[in-house]
Image (cartoon, helix red, strand yellow):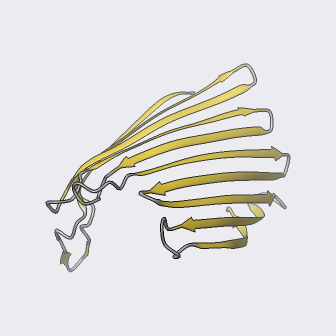
Amino acid sequence: SGFQLGLSFTPDEGDGGTASGFTGNNNGDMENVIGAGLNWSGDFDAIGIQLGAVGQFGSAEVSGTEDLSAWQLGSVISFGSVSIAGSYGDLGDSGQAVGSDIDTSFWTAGVAYAQDVWGISATYLDSEVGSNDYTSLVLGADYSLAPGLTPYIEATFFEADEGGTTLDNDGTIVLVGTYLNF
């Protein structure tokens, strides 16, 4: 219960290297990126509440590119075996060409139910980048067979709509696996 705060600074998000050296570049990444996150969690009788907010701000390396300015809000409310979650995020025109009319935003909603050794969940995502729209619905279930051994199944149904073109795409992804914890 209570508050948590996190802060970060990234001099150049595109920097990479190994023991053989640093590979600095100016390839369109963001630099001097400051990130901050704040969350609060608490309980009121049998209701649990979690609230969170994050933001990132930075400078574009290349002139003619919009600076990074992004934020997200999210919450989870739980009561008994049920949890309901949602979030909204906005990147504005971060990383786009200066003067373009391409904004990015997204929202999510989810619900989960856990009882003893099994759980089920459903999560929906809708994101927009300019006139392009991506949606997905994820359904999942897991069952704890033994301490540290939890098989699961997940199905994702997605649709990508490339505004004004025929480059749309949709599909289904099914994952089956096992969590091992030892």
Q: Looking at this view, is 147 or 177 the one in front?
A: 177
Query: In the rendered view of the protein, which quadrant contains the C terminus?
Result: bottom right
Residue in the picture at 35% in, 56% down: 102
Q: Quadrant of residue 18?
A: bottom left
Q: Relative to 71, is 109 on the left or the right?
A: right
Q: Quadrant of residue 13?
A: bottom left
Q: Where in the figure is residue 54, as x and y percent of width and height?
A: 42, 40
What residue is shown at x 77% (from left), y 63% (from top)?
A: 149
User: Where 59 falls versus 177 (above or below)?
Assistant: above
Q: Which quadrant does the N terminus fall into?
A: top right
In the rendered view, would you say 65 is above or below 73?
below
Give the answer, above or below, for where 92 lies relative to 152.
above
Q: Which sits in the foreground, 179 or 92? A: 92
**Left or right of residue 173: residue 100:** left
Residue 146 percent coordinates (x, y): 82, 60
User: How many labels, in total?
Assistant: 0
Instruction: Please name whichever residue, 17 or 138, is drawn nearer the observer in this view of the structure.
Output: 138
Using the rendered view, name the quadrant where residue 24 is placed. Answer: bottom left
Q: Position of residue 170 (x, y in %)?
A: 63, 72
